Amino acid sequence: MSRDPDEGPDDFRRSVDRYVNATTHRDRTRRALPGQKGQAQAPRQKSGAFAGKNSPAVDDTVAGTQGRIGWFEDQGFMKPEKYKKLVLFFLAGMLSLHVAVAWRSRELIRKGYPDFTALYSAGKIVREGVRKQLYDSQTQYRIQQEFAAGVSIRQGPLPYIHPPWEALLFVPFAWFSYPMAYLLWNAVNVLILLSLPFLLRNHLPQLRHVSALFWLFVSLAFYPIFFDLLQGQDILPLLLFFTLAFVSLKQNNDLAAGCWLGLGLFRFHLVLPLVFILLLHKRLKALLGFAVVAFVLAMVSVAIIGWNAALSYPSFVWHVETVMGHGAIVPVDMPNLRGLLHTFLAAHSSKLVIQLVVAVLSAALLLFASAKWRVAREGTAFDLGFSLVVVGTILVSYHANTYDLALLFLPVMLLTNHLAGVDGKGGWSRIALMGPMFVLFVSPLQMLLLQKYGKLSLLTPVLLFWTWGLASEISRLGSPSQIPVTQAM
C-alpha cells in the first residue's frame, strides 16, 4: 500500500535533502515530484536531538530564494538531484575508506603506535605521583614500555611536549588500559563533533535545520578529522575552543572569546597567530581574557612540575624539535608556508634564509588577514573573515600536521552556510572557495602525499588559493548588491 508522498522520510535522509537544497538555492520538495522513486515511505520516529524538524523559517528562506539558480545549476554541471546523490556517494566513499583503514590498523592501535601514547603516558606519570619527571625521557620511556613495548619503530619514548597542565586532562584515562583509554578519548572527540552544530546553530541560518547526525557523518568523512581520531590526537578540543571563541566574538563577548583561546594554549603555535590579530584589532577585553587564563594555566603548570622544570620547558621543546627534526618532524611534511619553502628552497638556500623568508611571508599574511577581517564586521562577511584568519593560522604556524587541518572544518561549515545564501556568480573566486574544500575531503590524495611521497607541503598552494578566494569574497560582499540572502531578508 502506497503512502502519501507528502510524508517525509527518515531524519538522516531529510537532512541530506535540506543540506543540498540550501546549497543549490532551489526548493526541490517531494510534492513537486510525487511519482519519484523512494518517496512513498513511512516516516520514522524522530529521535531526540538528532531529529530534524520542519520549520516556517525553512519555508521563508526557500521562498526568499525562489527564482535563484544554484551555482552548479548556473554553471550547467548537473541537476540538483544528481548533485545530491553524487555528494552523498562521495562522502560515503571517503567514510568507508576511513573505516577500512581504521579496521586494518586495529592491531597497531592496540600495541600503542598512535600518538595517543604520549598523552596517555603523561596522564600515567601524573597519576603515579612522579609529575616532576613529566619531561624526563627515561621516565616517559619506562611508562610507555608498560603498555607499548611492542612498538618496533621506537627506540625511545614518544615524547610528551605539550604544556604540563594538559597532562591533568588525561589522568582519568590513565586508570584504564591503553586500548580502552584510546576508545574513551575518541568517544569524547565524537561528542565534541556532535556539539559543533548546536553551538553554531544560530549562526548557520541556511543550515540550522540540518541534523547533528548528518554533520557528524560529514565530519567523519573529512580526512584531517579522521586522522586525528586514528592517532588519538588532541586537535578536536582546540576546534571546540575556536568554535566557542567564534560564537563569543559574534555575540560581542570578547572577554569570553579570549578565555576560550587561552584554554587552547596546549597548541600555542596555533592560537598565538589569532591572538596577534586580536591585538592588531585592539580587542582589549579578548586579550584580557586570554591573559588571565594563560596566567592561571601557567600557575597550574608550576604546581605540577615545579618552577625549575617549568622554566626549562621551552628549552625542552626546542631540544625535541632539534632532535626529531632530523627524522620524525620534517618541514616538507607540513602543509604551511614553512613546509612549502623547505620543499622548493632547501636544496638552494640555507636554513637561516628560509626561516627569514618564512617570517616575512607569515607576517605579511597575518597583516593581510587582519585587514580583511577588520572590514568584515557583520553577517556572513564576519564569518568569512574569521575563516580567513583560521586558514592563515595554519599557513603561518611553525608546525602543522595532517590532523591540525581539522581546524579547517569550522571554515567549511561557515563557508557552506554562506554559499547557501548567495547567487552563483563569482567566477574563479567562487571556484577558489569550493575547490579547496573538495580537496580537503579527498582522502586518497592526502594519504599519498603523507605516506608515500612525504610531501604534505604540496597542500599549501591549495590553502593559499583558498585564502585568495575568501579574501575576494569578502571584497565582493562590500558591494550592497552582493548582500547575501540571509542578510537581505
Image (cartoon, rainbow, N blue to C red):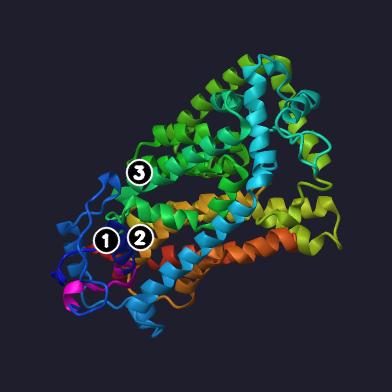
In the displayed structure image, the side of residue 451 where residue 174 appears, left or right: left
Q: Nearer the viewer, residue 308 or 170?
A: 170
The residue at the far bottom in this view is 76
Image check: 408 left or right of 21?
right
User: Is label 2 in a helix, a strand or a loop?
Assistant: helix
Dot label at residue 199: 3
In the rendered image, residue 130, in percent from the top left (x then y), is placed at 70, 15
Residue situated furthest front in the rendering: 1
Marked residue nearer the N-terminal end (2 or 1): 2
Q: At 17% from the left edge and 64% from the top edge, which residue is drawn? A: 59
Horizontal placement of 337 versus 410: left or right? Answer: right
Q: Which mark is residue 417?
A: 2
- Where residue 385 appears, as percent x and y from the top left, is 44, 55
Can the viewer see residue 376? no
Q: Are marks 2 and 1 in contact (CB under 8 Å)?
A: yes
For the C terminus, the quadrant is bottom left
Q: Look at label 3 and name its amino acid.
A: Leu
Element under label 1?
helix
For residue 278, say whether it is visible: yes
